[in-house]
Amino acid sequence: MTVTDREPEPNAPVLPEVRMHVAMPNAPVVGRIAATALCTRGKSASFVRHVEIDITGTALEGTFRAGQSFGVIPDGVDAHGKPHKVRLYSLASPTWGEDGFGRVIATTPKRLLAEREPHAPKDDPLDHSLFVGVCSNWLCDRKPGDAVQLSGPNGKRFVLPTDPDAHNYFLLATGTGIAPFRGFLMELLEGPPAHSPAASTWKRCASRIDLVMGVAYANDLLYDGWIRDLAAKHSNFHYHTAISREAQRDGSKGEYVHQCIDRKLKDSSGCMESLRSDRTLIYVCGLAGMQVGVFQTLLKHEIDGYMKIGEALAGTPSSEWTAEQIKRSVRPTHRCMLEVY
Ligand code: FAD
Ligand code: NAP
C-alpha cells in the first residue's frame, strides 16, 4: 500500500525540537577557521575541503543538531557593490561538534569551478570563460585563524530521531551531500570524546545503517578512509559506493546511487529486508533530482512507506510515471527526509 496524500502516516519518527535562526544573516556572528584540509580520497579534479570553524563565545555555540546547516557570508561585495548574500553549508559535525562541547563546527565545501554557460536570457551564449563560485572558493581559501561571518542554525527536519535505536537508516548522498551523514555516523556509531558532556548519556546505535555514496570517480569519495574504518569496526553499518564514471569491477557501466540500490535489492545484502521494514528511515542529501531515481527504484521493487502519491497519478500504474510526474506529484512521507539542492 502506498501512502496517498490524505492517509495518516504510520511509524513516523519522533524528531527533536531544534533551535533555528539564532543568528540572522544581517546580524551574523564571527567564527574563526580552526582547521582546513582536502577530504577527497585521492588526486581529484574536484576540490572539496573539510573546514572546521571555532564558534566559542558566539551565540551559535552549542546550538546545532547534526543534519542542520549554517550560513556563511563571504567578505566583499557583489557586482552591484552590495555585500554578498548568505550561502548555506551543511553541518558535517555531530551535535556535540568537533570538540565535544559544540564550540567547533565543520562543513564540507566544494569549490564551484566551471566553464561559464548561459543561466539567464541576457547571458552571452559564447562566453565560456572560467566561472568561479563566490562563497565556496572564499571559504576554501580561508586559513586557520581567519574570521568567517556565520548565521544559523537552519533546517529542522533533516535530523536524527530522538530515539535513534527505534529505526534503521538508509543514508543516500551525492558528492558533498555526505556532509550531514558524517555527523550522523559520528552520532550513531562513534560517540563523543570522553570529556564531552554528551558522553554520559550516549549509547551506540545497534540498528542497521546503510550509506550509499555517489561520486563521479573513486578518487572523489569524501571521508572515505574514515567511513571504511567505521564499516570495518561496526557490523551493523554497511558502506556502498556508486561511482558514475568508472566501470565496475565486473566490467559493467558506472552507476548512480539509485542504480546501486537497485543492484543491492537483488542480492543477499539485507537491503531489501531493511527497506521493507517499517522502522526504516531514508535520508537523501545532494543533487537536486537525485530523489527521482530513488523513488523510481522503490516503486519498481514495490517498497512502500516512503512516498505520498498525489491524486494526479491515481489510476496510472507506477511503471508508467515519468520523472517529471514523480517530481511534481510524489512527495516524501515522514520516513523519508530530503535535502536536495
Ligand atoms: P555562486 O557564486 O553563488 O554561484 C552559483 C550560482 O551561479 C548558481 O546558482 C548558478 O545560478 C550560477 N552558475 C553555476 N554554474 C555556472 C556556470 N557554469 N556558468 C554560469 N553561471 C553558473 N555546498 C557545499 O559545497 N557543501 C555543503 O555542505 C553544502 N550544503 C548546502 C546545504 C544547503 C541546505 C544548501 C541549500 C546548499 C548547500 N550547499 C553546499 C551549496 C552552497 O550553498 C552553495 O550554493 C555553493 O557552495 C555554491 O556557492 P558559491 O557562492 O560558490 O557559488
Ligand atoms: P557532483 O560531483 O556533481 O555529483 C555527485 C555524483 O552524483 C556524480 O557521480 C554524479 O554523476 C551523480 N549524479 C548526477 N546526477 C544524478 C542524479 N540525477 N541522480 C543520482 N546521481 C546523480 O556533486 P557535487 O558537485 O558534490 O554537488 C552536490 C550537490 O549537493 C550540490 O548541488 C550541493 O548544493 C548539494 N548539497 C546539498 C546539501 C543540503 O541540501 N543539505 C548539502 C550538501 C550538498 P555524473 O556527474 O557522472 O553525472
Image: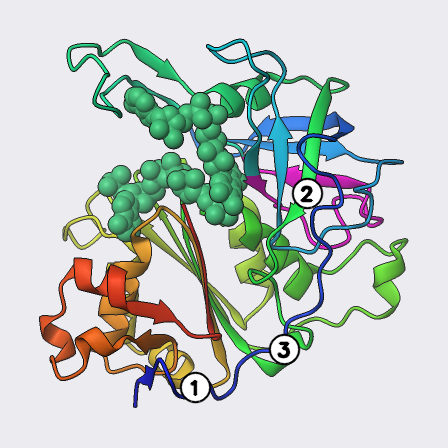
Image quadrant holding the N terminus, namely: bottom left
- Determine the residue positioned at 80% across, 44% down: 99
**Highlighted magenta segment, given as a residue range:** 89-108
Q: Mark 1 belongs to which amino acid? A: Ser
Residue at image mark 3 = 14
Residue 27 placed where, x, y %?
Answer: 74, 31
Left or right for 292, reference 32: left
Q: CA distance from mark 3 to mark 1?
A: 17 Å
Q: In the image, what residue occupies the spot 52% across and 76% down?
A: 168
* Residue 257 x %, y %: 31, 56
- Chief secondary structure of the magenta span? loop
Name above or below for residue 320 compared with residue 8.
above
Is 93 magenta? The answer is yes
Quadrant of residue 284 in the image? bottom left
Report the residue marked by disc 1: 277
Name the mark on residue 152.
Answer: 2
